[in-house]
Amino acid sequence: MWPDRKLTQLLGIEHPIIQAPMAGATNPVIVAAVSNAGGLGSFGAAGTPPKKLRETVWAIQERTSKPFNINLFAAHTEDFDRNARPGPRLAEQLTAYHAEFGLGDVPVPGPMFGPFDEQLDVLIEEKVPVISFHFGADVAAVERAHADGAKVLCSATTVDEAKTLEQAGVDAVIAQGGEAGGHRGTFSIDYERALIGTMALVPQVVDAVSVPVIAAGGIMDARGIVASLALGASGVQMGTAFLGCVEMSVLDAWRSSLGSAAAEDTKITKAVSGRPARAIRNRYIEEVEALGEQLLPYPAQYSVSRDLRKSAAERDDSGFMSMWAGQGVGLIRNQPVDEFMREIIESSQKLLGQLGSS
Ligand SMILES: Cc1cc2nc3c(=O)[nH]c(=O)nc-3n(C[C@H](O)[C@H](O)[C@H](O)COP(=O)(O)O)c2cc1C
């Protein structure tokens, strides 16, 4: 049915389609639905504390007996200088926002996610079949996951990062092109040097590593899936396309922005979290970037802007949400996940057949 079975065999799935883990947007219903449809559903658990994470795993296991994936941000992402404070212009801007929306004091920089070791313990104890990491994978974490039989995936944004991950023992590498929505998975060099388009990145990663390669970034439908296979990928990881599914936890204002945004309305910014991530432009991003001041590193920048996002969610205000989205956003369609999965699988098969017979 599919020309390359490396990834499907590795993960025990029917179709080489991974619904990207998207912290804050994924939920047990969508994860289980994708896995039940023969793909790999993924839950973005970076921001989920251990107790809640265990309950989330149970909620997924109640809905599916098929393999699924849980994603964490690498442990090192929570290391930062506790004395870091916003510069004068950022401090003034944040204070003005807090006054505008009737919020209290601007939060002091603090940790955001984790603790990683406890999150990983939960995944291992609950026998999660696939564990993926973002921002790199350390050997100890990969070995712990492997010891209990989990398969491990991690994103790379350059050929060198892919080789590093292979050496760390990951079972497959996600080649994340610059088109991708959400955080850049870059962990080794300046992100601007690692902004390599999916079309250029995937075949170079395929040539450089022996583990299966998963293409990510700008893949929205059968055309992107089949093109990725032609580039040598063994499967795809799609994020923005799945944001269109009605079961996804996407706030109304974000959903409406996704429906009207074009590729050029997205940009890579550090204004939200301190790490580069592709989002739909909004008032917060434009105004904070216009300050022209060095922002805080991750996760300090994320934590000082946290109350603004919370309040934006309550007010359904797209101006202050983190509306992650990739450059494929103009192709997004709103439909139930079962219908979306059926369509992309059938259309990919048809397209593969057409290309094979011409
Ligand atoms: C809303 C959103 C949230 C994301 N959150 C995560 C995450 O928590 N962990 C992760 O590994 N990748 C995350 N990503 C990146 C995806 O794994 C993937 O690289 C990306 O979605 C692929 O590009 P596409 O959005 O063009 O399909 C996120 C992407 C989006 C759009």
Image (tube, rainbow, N blue to C red):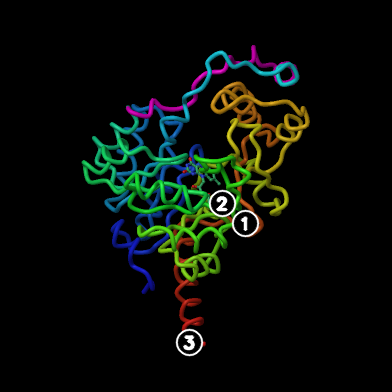
Please report the residue visible at 56 percent of the width from the left and 13 percent of the height from the top: 83
Please report the residue visible at 42 percent of the width from the left and 35 percent of the height from the top: 74
Contact (Cβ within 8 Å) of mark 3 with mark 2: no
Ligand 1 within 8 A of label 2's CB?
yes
In the rendered structure, which amino acid carries the disc numbered 3? Ser
Contact (Cβ within 8 Å) of mark 2 with mark 1: yes
- Alpha-carbon neighbours of circle 2 within 10 Å: few (<14), some, or many (≥20)? many
Which dot marks residue 117? none
Quick one: SS at disc 2?
Answer: helix
Quick one: SS at disc 1?
Answer: helix
Residue 261: where, in percent of width, then height? 70, 51
In the rendered structure, which amino acid carries the disc numbered 2? Thr
- Is 198 in front, or is 265? 198
In the rendered structure, which amino acid carries the disc numbered 1? Gly
Question: Is 229 on the left-hand or right-hand side of 149?
Answer: right
Quick one: SS at disc 3?
Answer: helix
Classify 141 as above or below 103.
below
Question: Is 208 on the left-hand or right-hand side of 282?
Answer: left
Q: Which residue is mark 3?
A: 357
Q: Which residue is mark 2?
A: 240
Mark 2 or 1 closer to N-term?
2
Which dot marks residue 328? 1
Q: Give the residues in magenta.
A: 92-117
Classify 89 as above or below 160.
above
Residue 117: where, in percent of width, then height? 33, 28
* 3D distance between C-alphas at marks 2 and 1: 7 Å
Mark 3 or 1 closer to N-term?
1
Residue 250: where, in percent of width, then height? 56, 42
Residue 76 is one of the magenta-drawn residues: no
